[in-house]
Amino acid sequence: GREADVFTLDNAISYHLDTVVDVGTNYGQMAVLGLILLVGFILALLGYVQDEMKREAQRTGKAPASNYHTDGDGLSGPRNVSDPIAYQHAKNKNVFLAMTFWKVIARDHILIGPLFFQEVFTR
């Protein structure tokens, strides 16, 4: 066989830490992560301020109140504005399923939902 590599250690833990743990600091990655967190915090704060401005305008009468419920029965028309069913396409099943699926994605998906956000989804 082959002879084993022999080396000396000061103590047993120093070899493990020096070979397993990266001792360098990744300032670039820390900066990118910090920037992403900062932008996310600013956008969340902006969304909160915009939402409160809208609610305050509705409370003071400067903006009309949101209508949530409609006259539908849930079978042939929506009962409220957050109903994702595509009632107008009920005769064509393929289009009906595709449009209903798209409305659910636009309302509930974590990445696509914010692009199609409407106030009525949260009320």
Image (spheres, helix red, strand yellow):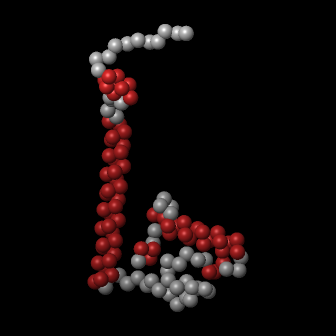
State the residue at coordinates (41%, 12%).
6
State the residue at coordinates (30%, 72%).
52
State the residue at coordinates (29%, 78%).
56
Q: Quadrant of the N terminus?
A: top right
Looking at the image, residue 21 lies above or below residue 35: above
Looking at the image, residue 89 lies above or below residue 7: below
Q: Quadrant of residue 97?
A: bottom right
Residue 108 appears at what percent x and percent y? Answer: 50, 67
Relative side of 85 to 56, left or right: right
Residue 98 appears at what percent x and percent y? Answer: 64, 69
Residue 63 appears at what percent x and percent y? Answer: 35, 81
Q: Quadrant of the C terminus?
A: bottom left
Q: In this rendered view, identify the residue nearer to me: 15 or 40.
A: 15
Q: In this rendered view, identify the residue nearer to me: 9 or 89.
A: 9
Residue 104 appears at what percent x and percent y? Answer: 55, 69
How many marks the image carries: the answer is 0
Q: Quadrant of residue 118?
A: bottom left
Looking at the image, residue 103 lies above or below residue 90: above
Looking at the image, residue 43 lies above or below residue 5: below
Q: Residue furthest front?
A: 1
State the residue at coordinates (32%, 36%).
27
Residue 98 appears anywhere in the view: yes
Residue 119 appears anywhere in the view: no
